[in-house]
Every structure is written in structure tokens, then in C-alpha cells.
Image (cartoon, rainbow, N blue to C red):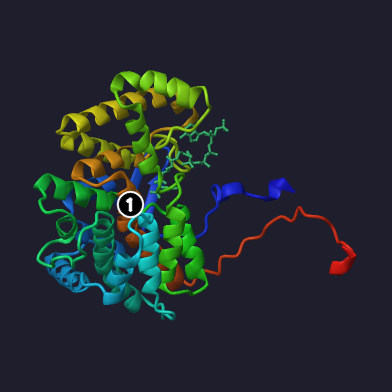
Amino acid sequence: MESDINLGLEDVFIKHTSLTYIDGIKGILRYRGYDINDLVSNCSFEEVSYLMIYGELPNKKQLDEFTKELKEHYKLPRHVLSLISELPRDSDALTMMETAFASMSSGEYSWNKENDRKQATKILGENLGIISNIYRHKMGLRLKEPDPKYGYAEAFLRNCFDNVTEDEINAMNAALIIYIDHEVPASTTAALIAASTLSDMYSCITAAIAALKGPLHGGAAEAAFNQFLAIKKPENVDSWFEDNIVNKNKKLMGFGHRVYKTYDPRMKIFKSIAEKLAITDDEKNLLKIAENLEDLGIKRFSSKGIYPNTDYYSGLVFNEIGFPVYTFTVLFGFSRVLGWVAHISEYVENEERLIRPRAVYIGPGEKQFKKIDER
Ligand SMILES: CC(=O)SCCNC(=O)CCNC(=O)[C@H](O)C(C)(C)COP(=O)(O)OP(=O)(O)OC[C@H]1O[C@@H](n2cnc3c(N)ncnc32)[C@H](O)[C@@H]1OP(=O)(O)O
Ligand SMILES: O=C([O-])CC(=O)C(=O)O
């Protein structure tokens, strides 16, 4: 019976897609045919958003029109800001994101290409206000609307911080592009299950956020970074690894992947940004810890195809930009909203089917029913 189950749906194909291609053996990631390295080096988040939503990279005119439409949605409905501000400040950032998206659910939604593109752009604009204000609320700052004078990454950082540098804006733009999509991980699959019932877009995103939260998926960046903090100094790496990973037979967080059996190409980009932005002694110290731990992890696990994934160095980058550790997962979600929306639109527009798998029953056989006073 057990052989009928594909635990974890490993290597089960659940949809067709023209969005994202992964070669897990060679370590290649492409969005709509373009290598992730080319997109990160040359594009704004807005350009790649257009690519994901419309299928092609935009020309100048298309980008200007798209950016204008996007900026019209930076402003959030009033109830969303008051809802965020009513939540306890120590609520989990992902819980705040779930609440905001759930509160915008339209109840009914008519799925078709034209509506989906408009809705995707609207959601991207709103998302900027939601995530920056989650940060503001958690930091005890007054909530405020993003300034449409700026492009996406810059407007986001300026809505979080008083001062931002060019390097930080570029790093945020890169992080936003890197996390956009990754085919059908757990969170996207959760969104697809909701979409396959013809639920509305906001509800599908809420389902995805719930699945992103855990440390085996989006929560891994925080878990990886917490390892670096716990190690404290580069000279402690060897003993920490021996005591906490080898002797306890524990997983090294930020390592391993269901699809990649080599280096995750996104991890290499995050690593080079983390190196570039490491300026203070604390940042350099954390980077050195991460690099030493990476070497030990590779020595021990690479023969099993376990290598560092995208979440291993992303926390260092977010920390260098100025974000606290408890925001790392929500920053991942900030970017991934686009991937979720692109996948669910593609799924419903192509009329793929209700997702309804089966479970192998292993409970008792038929039992004689007894009324409550006979039990
Ligand atoms: C953006 C992202 O979501 S990327 C993933 C982020 N998650 C993490 O970094 C958390 C740590 N990594 C993991 O837990 C896993 O590698 C996952 C969840 C990412 C992938 O899991 P799966 O494909 O289900 O692999 P599974 O957990 O079954 O592991 C297979 C084997 O590799 C080992 N393994 C997997 N990951 C690790 C790791 N990080 N450290 C040490 N060993 C590991 C397992 O112990 C298992 O060993 P065994 O066969 O001897 O029992
Ligand atoms: O593909 C996965 O399973 C997880 C991942 O790397 C992502 O969602 O970015």
C-alpha cells in the first residue's frame, strides 16, 4: 500500500508552465527563458514583473505604462492600514501579511487573461504598501503610504528607512528578482490548490503565505541566519558544527533542496551581494561565519547532493540592508507574491483541473456503532 503514495509529491508534475525552468543538476534557473543572472544584472523588478505577467520583456513605452499603472496601486485601502496597526506588534510578520491579504479578498473573482493582468498589477502595487507597513508597525513607526515618485525597490526601502544608499536599493532590487518564482514549491502549490477550486486571487495568496512560513521553506533564511548568530565567532564554527549538526544528526538550515542537487544559482548571487554590502565589523564577522560553515556543510553533505540554497545568504543581505531577522520571511513573500499570481493565473487560464489527490486509508475496518450510553 505504501508504494502507492508519493510522499511529499516528489517528482510529481502538477501543471504545465511557461514561467520558470529549473535544471536541478546543472544549477540553472530561468524566468521565461532568461537566465536569472542576466535578469538580476540588467533589469529592474518592474521589468521582470512585466515579463512574468505579459510573457515578454517590455520595451520602454510598455515599461512606462506598466510602471504608471503599478504606482496607482501603491495606495492601500484604508481598512488594510488600520487592520495592520490594530494587530499586536509582536505578531508574526507573516501573520500580518496573511491578515492583510485575507482582508482584501473580493469574495468572487472572474478569472480571465485581461482581469488577471490588471489584478496582478494591482496586487503588486498594494503589496509594497502592505510589507513596508508591516515593517513600520513592528518597529513602532507611524504607518504611511509609499511615495510613487520612486521605482519599486527604492519606494519600498524609502517607506521603511529614512536613509537609503544606491547599493542598498540595488541589493533590494536583486533580492526582489531572485525570489520572484521557483516553479511549484510548497507555497505555490498551496496557492494552486486554492485557485483550482476557482477561489479568488487574494485568498489564494493567503493560502500560499501560510505554506511559506515554515522553516523547511521560506522560514529557512531566518533559521540559517540564527545559526550564524548562535555561532558568534568564526573560530567557533567547527565546534558548533560538530556539536549541533554532526553529533545531534540535525539538518543544517539553508542547505538542501528538493530540486537542486548542486549549488542553487540564486545562492551564488546572494553570496556576492552579501560580500559587497558587508561593511561593519559585525557584518564581516557574520559573513566569515557563514562562509566557514558553508565549507564544512559542503565537505559533509555534498556527496548526498546537499548544497546551500537561496536562503543561506539572503538573510545576510537583508541584515546588511538594515532589516531585522524576523522580517526575512516576509521579505521573501514580498517578492514571491508575483510568482504565486503568475502561476495561479496560468493554471486557471489554461483550464487545468481541480486538484484533489487521494489518501491511502490505514484506519480500522468497519465497526459496530454504539450509542453514547452503551460506550
Ligand atoms: C527557498 C526554499 O524553500 S529552499 C529550502 C529551504 N529549507 C531549508 O534550508 C531547510 C533545511 N533543508 C531541508 O530541510 C531539506 O533539504 C528540504 C526540506 C529543503 C528538502 O527536503 P527533501 O527533499 O524532503 O529531503 P529530505 O528532508 O527527505 O532529506 C533527504 C536526506 O537529506 C538529508 N538532508 C536534507 N537536507 C539536509 C540539511 N539541510 N542538512 C543535513 N541533512 C539534510 C536528510 O536528513 C535526509 O537524509 P537521509 O536520507 O539520510 O535520511
Ligand atoms: O523550490 C522550492 O522547493 C523552494 C525554493 O527554493 C523556493 O521556493 O524558492
Picture coordinates of residue 201, whole percent (x, y): 40, 71
Residue drawn 43% across and 70% down?
Answer: 203
**Can residue 340 be seen in the rendering of this structure?**
no
Residue 123 falls in which quadrant of the image? Answer: bottom left
Residue 81 relative to residue 96: left or right: left
The C terminus - image quarter? bottom right
Q: Which residue is mark 1?
A: 332
Instruction: Give the vertical position of 277 relative to 347 (above or below).
Output: above
Callout 1, which amino acid? Answer: Phe
Residue 302: horizontal and vertical position, in percent? 44, 27
The spot of residue 65 in percent (x, y) is: 16, 72
Residue 190 relative to residue 64: left or right: right
* Foreground residue among 239 and 347: 239
Q: Residue at x 44, y 37 (%)?
A: 256
The residue shown at (25%, 48%) is 175
Which quadrant of the figure has residue 336? bottom left
Q: Residues within 10 Å of mark 1 (few under 14, many from 20)?
A: many
Q: Total label count? A: 1
**Residue at the location (55% across, 47% down)?**
10
Front residue of 221/327: it is 327
Reply above or below: 341 against 361. Answer: below
| Residue 1 drawn above or below residue 245 | below
**Image-based side of 261 in relation to 236, left or right:** right
Q: Is residue 184 left or right of residue 76?
A: right
Distance from mark 1 CB to nearest ligand 1 atom below 8 Å: yes
Q: Is residue 70 above or below residue 300?
A: below
Return the x and y of residue 220 as percentages of the image width and height.
Answer: 40, 43
One can see residue 5 in this view: yes
Secondary structure under the numbered disc 1 in the rendered image: helix
Between 357 and 349, the one lying in front of the other is: 357
Between residues 279 and 174, which one lies in front from this camera angle? 279
